[in-house]
C-alpha cells in the first residue's frame, strides 16, 4: 500500500476524526481545527489561543476540543467557543488526546509530567467528563495515555500507552468510570500514538517513537497484521471515507514546537485498506 498526499502546509496535526463526510484534525501550532474533504479542499473550523488536540462531538452535534496548555475542554457550537470543562485540578501536565462516546462521555489523557519537566512521565489516569459535566480521574496509572478507541460493544475502552509501549483495554462501567485493565497488545519497540479501530477488532496505530516512521495494524494479543512505512514520523491515523476503507495518516518532521511551528512541513496522507472502520471513534 502506498500513501497519497491529501494536503500539506500542516505544522503538527493531531486528533483526526472522520465526521460528516470529511477528515477533521487539530493543528497544534497553527492553533486551529480544520476539516478536509477527499478532494483536498480544506476549511478552518475554529481557532483558539492555545494548542488544540483531541476532538469529539456531543450528541447534539457540538464539537468538543482539547485546549492543551490551559488544560481545558472547549465546546464549539458552530459560532462560539466556551469552556466545557476545566481540567487543571486533574491533569498534572498538558492535556492531549480525547475520545467521546455516542452518549457524551468524554475521556481525556495528559502527558503525565509538568510542562517544565519533560524527563520521565509519571503514570497518570484518564480524566472522565460525564454528560452532565461532572469530572473525575478514572482508571489505573497509564504511561503517557494517548490515542483511544471504543469497541462496538461499548463496554471497554482501548488506550495507547506511548511510553508503556502497549495498548491497554479498560472496563467501561455504566456510569462512565473505568475499571479492570488488561493488555490488548504489547507494541515492544514502538510507541503507539493516535489510533483507530477496524471492523475486525484490530487497531491501526501511528508509531511515534524513534525510529518509528510507520503505521501499524495490530490484533488483540499483539500480532502485527500490516505495516505502512512513512517518510516522516506519523503521529495519528484514522479510518474513514464513504465506505470506511480509507486510512488517513498525519505526519510531521517532529513534534517539537521549535522545529516545526510555522514551517508547514507536516501533511495528511491517505491509502485504501481492506478492512473498513468499525464506525466508532
Image (cartoon, helix red, strand yellow):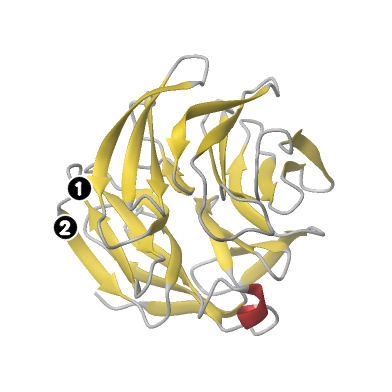
The spot of residue 116 in percent (x, y) is 69, 59
Q: Is residue 221 visible?
A: yes
C-beta proximity under 8 Å, tags 1 and 2: yes
The tag on residue 98 is none
Compared to 212, does 152 lie above or below? above
User: Which residue in the rendered view is the most extreme toward the top?
Assistant: 174
| Mark pair 1, 2: CA separation | 7 Å
Which residue is found at the position 44% from the left and 17% from the top? 173
Q: Which residue is mark 1?
A: 219
Query: 241 or 174: which is nearer to us?
Result: 174
Residue 13 picture quarter: bottom right
Secondary structure of residue under mark 1: loop
Query: 54 or 122: which is nearer to us?
Result: 122
Q: Residues within 10 Å of mark 1 (few under 14, many from 20)?
A: some
Instruction: Please indicate whether residue 147 sits to the left or right of residue 224 in the image.
Output: right
Residue 261 picture quarter: bottom right
The spot of residue 83 in percent (x, y) is 80, 39
The spot of residue 228 in percent (x, y) is 27, 71
Compared to 27, does 160 lie above or below? above
Query: 257 or 92: which is nearer to us?
Result: 92
Q: Residues within 10 Å of mark 2 (few under 14, many from 20)?
A: few
The spot of residue 188 in percent (x, y) is 25, 57
Secondary structure of residue under mark 2: strand
The tag on residue 225 is 2
For the C terminus, the image quarter is top left
Amino acid at each position: 500500500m502506498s500513501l497519497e498526499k491529501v494536503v500539506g502546509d500542516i505544522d503538527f496535526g493531531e486528533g483526526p476524526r472522520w465526521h460528516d463526510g470529511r477528515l477533521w484534525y487539530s493543528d497544534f501550532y497553527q492553533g486551529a481545527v480544520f476539516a478536509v474533504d477527499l478532494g483536498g479542499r480544506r476549511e478552518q473550523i475554529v481557532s483558539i489561543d492555545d494548542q488544540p488536540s483531541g476532538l469529539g462531538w456531543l450528541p447534539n452535534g457540538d464539537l468538543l476540543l482539547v485546549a492543551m496548555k490551559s488544560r481545558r475542554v472547549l465546546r464549539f457550537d458552530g459560532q462560539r467557543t466556551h469552556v466545557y470543562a476545566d481540567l487543571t485540578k486533574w491533569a498534572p501536565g498538558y492535556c492531549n488526546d480525547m475520545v467521546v462516546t455516542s452518549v457524551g462521555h468524554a475521556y481525556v489523557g495528559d502527558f503525565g509530567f509538568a510542562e517544565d519537566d519533560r524527563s520521565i512521565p509519571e503514570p497518570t489516569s484518564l480524566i472522565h467528563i460525564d454528560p452532565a459535566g461532572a469530572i473525575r480521574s478514572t482508571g489505573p496509572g497509564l504511561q503517557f495515555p494517548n490515542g483511544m478507541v471504543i469497541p462496538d460493544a461499548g463496554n471497554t475502552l482501548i488506550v495507547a500507552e506511548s511510553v508503556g509501549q502497549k495498548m491497554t483495554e479498560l472496563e467501561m462501567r455504566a456510569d462512565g468510570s473505568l475499571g479492570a485493565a488488561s493488555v490488548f497488545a504489547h507494541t515492544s519497540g514502538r510507541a503507539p500514538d493516535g489510533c483507530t479501530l477496524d471492523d475486525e477488532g484490530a487497531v491501526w496505530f501511528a508509531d511515534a517513537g524513534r525510529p518509528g516512521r510507520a503505521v501499524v495494524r495490530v490484533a488483540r494479543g499483539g500480532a502485527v497484521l500490516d505495516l505502512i512505512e512513512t517518510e516522516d514520523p506519523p503521529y495519528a491515523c484514522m479510518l474513514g471515507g464513504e465506505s470506511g476503507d480509507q486510512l488517513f495518516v498525519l505526519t510531521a518532521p517532529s513534534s517539537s514546537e521549535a522545529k516545526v511551528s510555522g514551517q508547514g512541513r507536516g501533511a495528511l496522507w491517505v491509502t485504501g485498506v481492506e478492512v473498513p472502520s468499525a464506525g466508532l471513534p
